[in-house]
Structure formats: C-alpha cells, structure tokens
Amino acid sequence: MDEKSTKKIGRRDLLKVMTASAGALTISAFLPKKWSKPVVDFGVSPVHAAASITTGTIQGTTYLNHALNKPTAPDLVFTWFPMAGATVSVDGMPALKSTSGINGVYTITNVPIGSQTITCVPPQDYYFPIDPNPASNVPVTVSGITPATQDFHFEDRG
C-alpha cells in the first residue's frame, strides 16, 4: 500500500513560497543567456610613480612698447602694453607651445619638470626684444608645484 503524506501549508508559508518563486522568475529574466568570462582592464603603478608629479607649467606675459609711447631722453619712463599674438614654445618640443591672448598672457602646460629653454616669436612687424635679450633659448626651471614664469618685452621700432 502506498501512503502519500500530505502536509498542510499555512497561508503565510504559501505566500513566502510564491514570493520566492516570482522573484526567481524575475531575476532569471535579467540574466544573460550565455555566460562569458568578464574582461577587466586595469593597471598597477608603483607607489612612487603614482604619487610623483612629472610635468609642470610655464606662463608669462608678452609686452610691447608702442612707437607713440617711446621714451625720449632724458625721460626714460617706459609704457608697456600687453601684446597679443606672440608664440612661445619649448625648445626641442614643437607640440609644447602657446600663443599670447589679447591680455598678453600665455600658458604652456604638460612641460617636463627640470631645466628647459623657451623661445618667443612676436607677431609680424614687432621686433627687437628688450628683456630678455634675445627672446630665444631663454632658460626656465619647471617645477610640478608652481608655474615657471617668464615675461617678454618687445618694441616696434619701425
């Protein structure tokens, strides 16, 4: 004789089973049909490399002494105006350059730390660098903390 055992399930237990079944069906709808190996891209840098700064900034202003404001002897008072359009570049690194804006300010970023030399080329018709003289191969020391600063002064003697 076969005896089947029957067990009564209370309403609370029935509700738990139904909720678990519905949740399993819902989750299975979001699972991928085929599992694949996950791809994880990452790199590890040594602690000293991750914490060290390797580049810095060079900035400055380009100025011009206009012909109408040239000092005359014995009056040696210079009136300098910001000069836009001067190109300042890091020697030996042609991609590292900047052109001074309307306020005469230029900024070159991502310059390797250490001793560098820069060159400033004024826009057409402006010549004669006053300070530094000449405006090429000017030494600057680049730090990762504060920008290196170098101003250029030109005069229009035309």
Image (cartoon, rainbow, N blue to C red):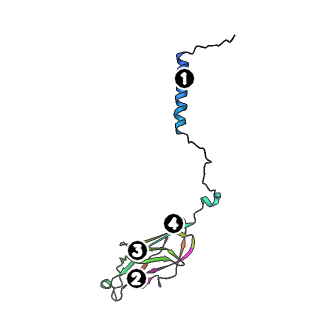
Determine which residue is flagged by label 2.
Answer: 154
* Residue depth check, mark 4 versus mark 3: number of the one nearer the observer: 3
Q: Is residue 23 above or below residue 97?
A: above
Marks 2 and 4: in contact by CB < 8 Å?
A: no
Which of the two discs, 4 and 3, labels the residue nearer the N terminus? 3
Foreground residue, 45 or 157? 45
Question: Circle 4 — which element?
Answer: loop
Q: Which residues are magenta?
A: 115-136
Q: Residue shown at 61%/59% (left/top)?
A: 50
Name the amino acid type tagged 1. Answer: Lys
Determine which residue is flagged by label 1.
Answer: 16
Question: Circle 1 — which element?
Answer: helix
Rendered image: mark on residue 146? 4
Name the amino acid type tagged 3. Answer: Ser
Which of the two discs, 4 and 2, labels the residue nearer the N terminus? 4
Q: State the image quarter where residue 7 is shown.
A: top right
> x, y (%) of residue 11?
52, 16
Does residue 75 belong to the magenta stretch? no
Q: Is residue 13 above or below residue 149?
A: above
* Residue depth check, mark 1 versus mark 3: number of the one nearer the observer: 1
Question: Circle 3 — which element?
Answer: loop
Determine which residue is flagged by label 3.
Answer: 100
Does residue 120 belong to the magenta stretch? yes
